[in-house]
Image: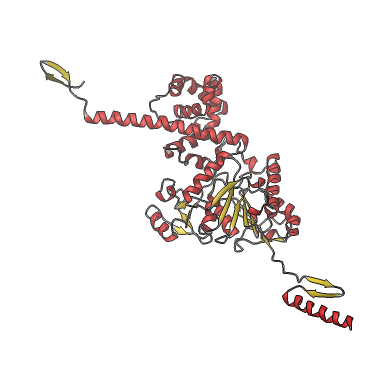
Amino acid sequence: MAPLEKKAGRAWPAPAAPRRRQRMESRNGVERSAYFARREAAKVLRSALQGDARRRAVGSIKSLVYSPSIRNKKATFALVCQTLKHLPLLKEVLAATNILSGKWKRQEELVYVIAYDVLFGQDIAMSGPVEKFLMLRKNELQSALAKLYVKEKVKSVENLLLKYQTPVSSKPRYVRVNTLKMDIESAMHELGKATTVMKDDLVPDMLVVPTRTDLHDHPLVMNGSVFLQGKASSMVAVALCPKPGWQVLDACAAPGNKTAHLAALMRGRGKIIACELNEERVKVLGTSITKSGAHNIIHGDFLNLDAKDPKFSKVRAILLDPSCSGSGISAERLDNLLPSYSQDDIDAANSQRVKKLAAFQRKALVHALSFPVVERVVYSTCSIHQTENEDVIKSVLPFAASLNFELATPFPQWPHRGIPVFEGSEHLLRTDPTEDMEGFFIALFVRKRVKKKIIRRQTREIYLPFGKTSAMWMRHHNKKKKKMDHA
């Protein structure tokens, strides 16, 4: 009890001790932070789960968490990952308690996040209405979890999670320097203050940092001076090799890392037509482009572009990175945490979904090759499936050859090439998700230079090369012949 002090003949409690007040304020701050982090996590979780259900993700879990609209990124990221990790257990527990059958169904994702905190998270006060409701039913939730232990014959949540999870290997970290804003030496100097930095030996302007290095909040990342982009992903724009001043088309541009990379390779000169159909992904694309400092970019829907339209008559290079199964980067995207992911799905190369994707990819590639003056076309996927890679290339080769395109060899020193299912597959490039940590595929089409044919003009039985000199000779010859006819 606080000591009393006398004032005007009466006893009054002494003011609360400063330390006690600071502890209360600190606890209130933690509770407020946790309250908002849960709601931000629920927002991300909703986007991730809805995209997973439709097999059309707006973005990876990381890109959703680290978008500008999320304020408490670290707490939100941890909550999203842990909730997804425990999601199969949470669904069974909530189903057993019948909690999601009523009005709380409309806040399903928030219920998942808070149920995780109630059962497995830190012991902190619950201040929101959903928090208070679930705390009232905490004993019921714990009882349902205990019954699940008995059913699965395990003694801990860790053993229970092993029945649902697929192990994932750790990955190296790569950073691409945005040369529109910073040179590579300056970037190495600044990043070197936080971690060990090395230059990559293959991809220009790419740096390597130790595994598990977290640079999401680094000032250079926040202002677009560097991009957190995988090595294989960065190889795509380099393979296209656009020249400064060219007009380039990025056919399926979101989230925009490759678009920004193209702009840097072109040194901000020329024009990039960045196409994206999905409205939400267009917003993500716009954020990446603005952050990169690239101003030579416009938007459009690729398949609706008329290849014969005069405004595309100067497109000399096209980067086509269409929607794919993402089977090569499922761990990097944290897709292994989503409900649709399973080890069997990785091997489902002949599934209906992959076949539909391959049909779209084939259509898009044919359209890209149809632009009249395009010289270079890169087709890339982040898939390991032959159906989306070699099979798509093989199916368009006759059409490509009719337009004088041939396969070229990007990064000839790279050891992993295409699956040998047709002659010329050695020109294709693959990265191995086991060895290279990402499963990418790259094919480069280059239009062959056609030698100019000499056009000949027929004058009676005489064939003459058409040109200024031959025209003068023709006039002289006709005059001479006319005089001889009159003689």
* Quadrant (top left/top right/bottom left/bottom right) for the N terminus: top left
Q: Residue at x 46, y 35 (%)?
A: 79
The residue that appears at 61% across and 49% down in the rendered structure is 382
Q: Which of 298 and 279 is in front in this view?
A: 298
Q: Nearer the viewer, residue 368 or 194?
A: 368
Looking at the image, which residue is at 57% across and 61% down?
243
Q: Where is residue 308 in the image (x, y as percent from the top left)?
A: 69, 53
Furthest residue in direction front, as rendered? 486
Q: Which corner quadrant holds the C terminus?
A: bottom right
Please provide percent x and percent y for residue 234.
54, 54
Residue 266's spot in the image, x, y percent? 53, 59
Residue 158 appears anywhere in the view? no
Residue 483 visible in the shown view? yes
Q: In which quarter of the image is residue 394?
A: bottom right
**Numbered circles on residues, count:** 0
Look at the picture and state if 380 lies above or below 453.
Answer: above
